[in-house]
Image: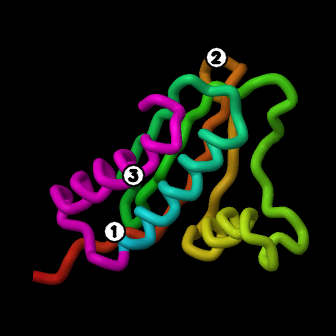
Amino acid sequence: MPARRTSVPEARKRVIALLREWGADQQVRDDVELVVSELFTNAVRHTDSEKVGCELTLLGSYLRIEITDEGGPGVSAPHAQPGSLDKEGGRGLFLVGALSESWGTRPDDSGRGRIVWADLPYSPAAH
């Protein structure tokens, strides 16, 4: 998707549609929507990307979210800033950490960009 703020709600919409199709529990949908929003927003705001990718994969009882950016000069791996809970910006990665079983970063296949991933507990909706 284009690396613009207007793409964030579109990414959320697509993720929720896919999770509904998969039959995900409402809590899973809510948590994944928030994590995708935070990670996608970070990729748009803190990289020189023209495009940002978003991929979901079911891994047993976990759902992996991967947000891929195109990097840029001087772009460092995302990390929670000390004291950022009190600031307007900066809470996002604390939320990602709280909702995820684990999360981290790795270089993308090109070596220029980065993939930020998060594994969240997954459960189907009760029928």
On residue 9, the disc is 3
Q: State the image coordinates of residue 107 (x, y, percent, origin top left).
A: 69, 31
Mark 1 residue element: helix
Whether residue 34 appears in magenta in the rendering, the answer is no
Sequence-first tag of 2 and 1: 1
Residue found at x 24% / y 52%: 18
Please rate how many residues cluster around mark 2, counting C-alpha atoms within 10 Å: few if below 14, some from 14 to 19, many from 20. few
On residue 57, the disc is none
Task: Check the image and name the residue furthest to the bottom.
Answer: 126
Q: State the image coordinates of residue 93 (x, y, percent, origin top left).
A: 69, 63
- Specify the quadrant that holds the N terminus: top left
Q: Is residue 53 above or below residue 8?
A: above
Residue found at x 38% / y 72%: 30
Residue found at x 33% / y 68%: 29
Q: Which residues are magenta?
A: 1-27
On residue 110, the disc is 2
Residue found at x 41% / y 63%: 33
- Specify the quadrant that holds the C terminus: bottom left
Locate residue 21 relative to residue 97 in the image: left or right: left
Closest to the camera, between mark 3 and mark 1, is: 3
Mark 2 residue element: loop
Sequence-first tag of 3 and 1: 3
Q: Is residue 67 above or below residue 33?
A: above
Q: Which amino acid type is shown beneath numbered disc 3? A: Pro
Q: Which amino acid type is shown beneath numbered disc 2? A: Ser
Residue 103 sits in quarter: bottom right
Q: Which amino acid type is shown beneath numbered disc 1? A: Arg
Mark 2–mark 1 CB contact (< 8 Å): no
Q: To which residue does mark 1 refer?
A: 29
